Structures are given as structure tokens and as C-alpha cells.
Image: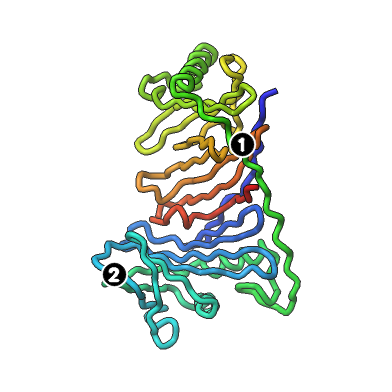
Amino acid sequence: MLPTLASAAVPEPKVFRDWMAGCDNVKTCTAVSLPAEAADPIAYLRLERPAGSDGAASLRLKLRGDWKTPPRTAQLKLDGAAFPAGGKPLAVTTEADLATLTFSAEDTAALIEAARKAAKLTVTTSGLTGSVSLAGSIAAMLWIDEQQGRLGTTTALIRKGTNTAVPPAPALPVVAAVPAPPMLDMKTGKRQAASLRAELKKKDPDSCEDDTALAGHDEAWALGNKRVLVALSCSRGAYNLSSSFYIMPENEPAKAVPLSFADGRNELTNASFDPRTGHIAFSDKGRGMGDCGATGGYAWTGSGFVQSEFSLMGECRGISPEDWITLYRSANR
């Protein structure tokens, strides 16, 4: 019997004016400010908080710019007034064109409190100034408090109270990913994929574009027990290549079974399988610069594929993929 794929349903992030928020399957929640569409330079805040009584909020400010000299510090202002009080410069780290400021717990609490009345945070470094809208930030954090069961508790971000009881975080799913057997040699892999492409052309000519250039990207990997994972390249855009995934018995394309990913289809974008880790990774770009879309992965357990991670950013605003909102996560065993 061929393996199946287990899918995990994930909720959509919510938009609160100029902020977006979402929580994953273990109630770790994230809120991100959305830069204006024409913002230059791009600046944004990202707050993340795990669930449970010990879950501490972490807050970072990102500024993307064309540096002549990588910045080491930044100056902040809230509605024109120095922040923190006294206007001390805050340390930043820089990687390529992205500067990161990590707030202390004290400054995080002060900024959250100030956001109740302030409208805009500005950051200046290396001669560049970016701004972050705080419109919607309180609503986003209040929503996070609600999702984590913190409303009216001493650990709430916004609506604090005297209650000290906070629901614990759900258990993190453990995925036992299994490395695949040694890779098929290129000739064998191409032959397996070509046989499935020919079979699908006979059964359903519209299921996959029959294009020589696309077929050149077809791949196949051994899964053990005479099973093969096949990825057929079925459509191409300016910056996305979509592939349909099947598991089939070796040399028996008529018995191939399409996988069913979280959206119910067997198609992933810019995806490939790493036999060493047993992991399919994908990245669906919303536009060429890759500042929006979805990323995620599925792990081979030896009997099926299960979702291992998923992150999403539905607004194209210059936000780096590592700062997108995580909606599903797991631990690998």
C-alpha cells in the first residue's frame, strides 16, 4: 500500500490596520507592522511571544537600507520625542542591507505602553530615517492576549489584571523524519519521471503542461521498498516553478498516487526533496523580490509525508522571509 500525506490546517493571519498578527499550532503568536507600500527605506517592528506563563515577548525593529558604512547604533523617536527617555542610542546588528535592533524587556514594555497613545515610531541610522506606524498595534497585541488566554492576567500585553493563571502552551508536534535511501542516478530518475509524465498525458492531458523545457526540471528520488517520489514540473511563471508530487511503485506509473498537501492539491512551488533529511521544502513567492508569499515543508516518516512548518506573509511590503508569520511548527526527532 502506498503512503499518504498528513496535512495540518492552519488559520489565516489577521490584519489590524497597519499591523498583521497570527498564531501557530502551539499558540506562539507574532505581530508585524506593515510598512507603507511606497516606504523607502523600509522599517518594521516584529513582536513574538510563546504561550504559557513563562512565555516572554521579544520585540525587534528592522531597517533596510543602502549602507555606505554598516550602522552600529540607531536613534528612536515616538511622535517626535526621544525614545527611550533621554534619547540614548541603541545598539544594532547589520547583515547586508538589513539592520536589526533587539529591544530589552524594559524597553519592550515601555514601547508597548507608549503605543496606546503614540502614532509613529521613527528610526534613524547611517543617515537614513524610516518610520513605523503604530496604528493597529494595540488591537493586534490585544488579540494575541486573547489567543493565549492572557486577558485579565498579570502577564497580558494590553489588558492586564490580577489573575495569574495562564493556559500552558500546547505540546509541540514531533515529526520523526526519515532520511531516504541513496539517490537514484540521474538517468534512472529521469526515466522514472518521464514514464509518469507519459502516463499522465494519456490519462489526463490537462493535468500537467507538456513542455520540453518544463520536463527538463522533472525529478525523482528513491523512498525505499521499491517506491519513488516524483516531482513533475507543470507550470512556470516569471519567478515561480510549480511541481506536482506523486509516489509510485518503481517502473509502475499507472499506479502512481498524487500527494495531498495542506491545500488539498499535490502541487508545491519552488520545491525540492532533500533525501539526507527526508524533507520537502517549498517557497512560493508573491513577487520577484521575495518579500511576500509562503514557505514551508513536509517530512518523510517512512510511511507518509507530514507537514513540518509553514509561514506566510500576505502583504508585499518588503518584509524578510525570516520575519513572516509562522502558522505551523514542529520538532524533528
Q: Residue at x 29, y 69 (%)?
A: 128
Residue 1: percent from the left, percent from the top? 70, 23
Q: Amino acid at mark 1?
A: Trp
Q: Which residue is mark 2?
A: 128
Q: Residue at x 67, y 24 (%)?
A: 2
Residue 270: percent from the left, percent from the top? 44, 37
Q: Quadrant of residue 252?
A: top right
Q: Residue at x 40, y 37 (%)?
A: 240
Numbered mark located on residue 153 in the image: none
Residue 278: percent from the left, percent from the top? 57, 38
Q: Nearer the viewer, mark 1 or mark 2?
A: 1
Q: Residues within 10 Å of mark 2 (few under 14, many from 20)?
A: some
- Of 291 and 152, which appears nearest the observer? 291
Numbered mark located on residue 300 in the image: 1
Of callouts 1 and 2, which one flags the residue occurring earlier in the amino acid sequence?
2
Can you say whether 107 is above or below 296 in the image? below
Which residue is outermost to the bottom? 86
Which residue is outermost to the front? 182
Residue 32: percent from the left, percent from the top? 49, 62
Q: Residues within 10 Å of mark 1 (few under 14, many from 20)?
A: many
Can you say whether 184 is above or below 145 in the image? above
Can you say whether 8 is above or below 171 in the image? above
Indicate left or right for 171 with 268 as reference: right
Dot 2: element = strand
Q: Which colouring convention does the figure follow?
A: rainbow
Dot 1: element = strand
Indicate left or right for 38 with 34 as reference: left
- Of 162 and 93, which appears nearest the observer? 93
